[in-house]
């Protein structure tokens, strides 16, 4: 009888040890709500939804830090996301009192909503809302224009071609050097590369755009250009002494990882040349042009490139009349360094 009692107690102990999930869920909820900034984010989301960059601006912190806080809130079920085109917005999750933690969730939001945000935060929030209204007006006024016209309003090649060529020519590549352009679009920059490099490769995963580039190459008889329909992040065999990304990086969902993978396409002693927008808040660019990122901070590009084994080199900045600023950045791969995969 004693043994049966001990066995029963042992089984109950094991069952309890193997089933801590409900307490884990409550613990995650308590942890997520145990930070003043996260509580403030929940308060800001009471009447609207925001993207991570908008929230970073409202609370005056780096985007990486805000992403961490949003991840914690999402894991606790306090926020959820919605996709609008290519943009992702965060909103509060509605509490479900019938579910585990539902009453705590509901009470937490009720208490949060009793507290007002600081004046400085409210000012930045109002600025974001005002910018949204302004960019919506800009967007709708341009809706009837074609994609290329919309692109040119932001940063057409004509607006930064000379700066890009100045960086390439200053680099003084050898006559045997090769180039790789990732995402060449309709191929507008390929003639400039074909003139300066022994051979040029172009990689794009959009067959229709690649056909436009092919037509341009044929019309200009660019015999040293090869076009590849492929995923740039998976085309490890295609490399170059000069790898060019013109207005491409902001289309990747994870630009830091993409830059690392693309840096591996650079031959030792070569360079990665990136042209993109500096960080901005004109949200209409997401839907108008499919941008996933509203430009980049200069120090972020340098940090990501350094992590990929590259050394920051020359850079040029071009201001545009419509409020955007272009950054053309060159990053070197030292001779003899291995590729990062």
Image: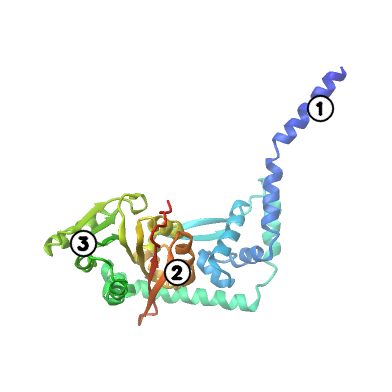
Up the image or down, 278 lies above or below 264; here it is: below
Residue 146 visible in the shown view: no
- Where does the N terminus fall, quadrant-wise? top right
The label number, if any, that marks residue 91 in the structure image = none
Up the image or down, 173 lies above or below 257; here it is: below
Residue extending farthest to the front is: 336
Nearest the eye: 134 or 241: 241
The label number, if any, that marks residue 296 in the structure image = 2
Residue 192 screen position, x and y as percent: 22, 69
Residue 50 screen position, x and y as percent: 52, 65
Say which label, 3 or 2, has the lower sequence index.
3
* CA gap, disc 3 and disc 2: 32 Å
Nearest the eye: 207 or 274: 274
Which image quadrant for residue 273?
bottom left
Q: Name the residue under label 1.
A: 9
Q: Which residue is drawn at 61% across and 55% down?
A: 72
Label 1: element kind: helix
The label number, if any, that marks residue 198 in the structure image = 3
Residue extending farthest to the right is: 2
Q: Is 196 displayed left or right of 293 in the figure?
A: left
Residue 177 screen position, x and y as percent: 26, 62
Q: Is 109 displayed left or right of 230 in the figure?
A: right
Label 3: element kind: loop
Q: How crowded is mark 2: few (under 14 residues within 10 Å), some or many (20 or more)?
A: some
* CA gap, disc 1 and disc 3: 78 Å
């Amino acid at each position: 009888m004693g043994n049966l009692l001990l066995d029963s107690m042992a089984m109950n102990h094991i069952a309890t040890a193997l089933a801590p999930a409900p307490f884990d869920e409550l613990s995650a909820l308590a942890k997520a709500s145990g930070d003043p900034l996260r509580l403030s984010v929940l308060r800001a989301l009471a009447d609207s939804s925001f993207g991570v960059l908008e929230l970073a601006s409202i609370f005056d912190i780096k985007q990486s830090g805000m992403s961490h806080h949003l991840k914690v809130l999402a894991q606790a079920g306090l926020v959820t996301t919605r996709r609008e085109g290519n943009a992702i917005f965060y909103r509060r999750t509605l509490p479900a009192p019938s579910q585990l933690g539902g009453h705590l969730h509901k009470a937490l939001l009720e208490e949060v909503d009793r507290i007002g945000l600081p004046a400085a935060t409210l000012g930045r929030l109002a600025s974001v809302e005002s910018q949204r209204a302004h960019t919506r007006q800009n967007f709708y006024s341009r809706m009837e224009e074609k994609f290329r016209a919309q692109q040119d309003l932001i940063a057409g090649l004509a607006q930064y071609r000379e700066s890009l060529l100045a960086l390439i020519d200053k680099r003084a590549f050898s006559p045997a050097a090769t180039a790789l352009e990732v995402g060449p679009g309709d191929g507008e920059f390929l003639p400039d590369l074909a003139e300066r490099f022994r051979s040029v490769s172009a990689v794009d995963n959009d067959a229709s755009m690649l056909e436009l580039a092919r037509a341009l190459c044929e019309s200009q008889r660019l015999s040293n250009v090869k076009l590849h329909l492929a995923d740039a992040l998976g085309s490890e065999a295609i490399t170059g002494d000069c790898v060019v990304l013109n207005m491409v990086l902001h289309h990747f969902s994870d630009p830091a990882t993409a830059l690392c993978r693309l840096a591996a396409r650079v031959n030792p002693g070569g360079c990665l040349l990136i042209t993109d927008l500096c960080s901005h808040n004109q949200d209409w660019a997401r839907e108008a042009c499919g941008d996933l990122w509203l430009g980049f901070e200069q120090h972020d590009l340098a940090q990501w490139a350094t992590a990929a084994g590259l050394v920051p080199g020359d850079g040029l900045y071009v201001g545009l009349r419509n409020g955007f600023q272009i950054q053309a950045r060159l990053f070197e791969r030292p001779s003899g360094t291995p590729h990062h995969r």
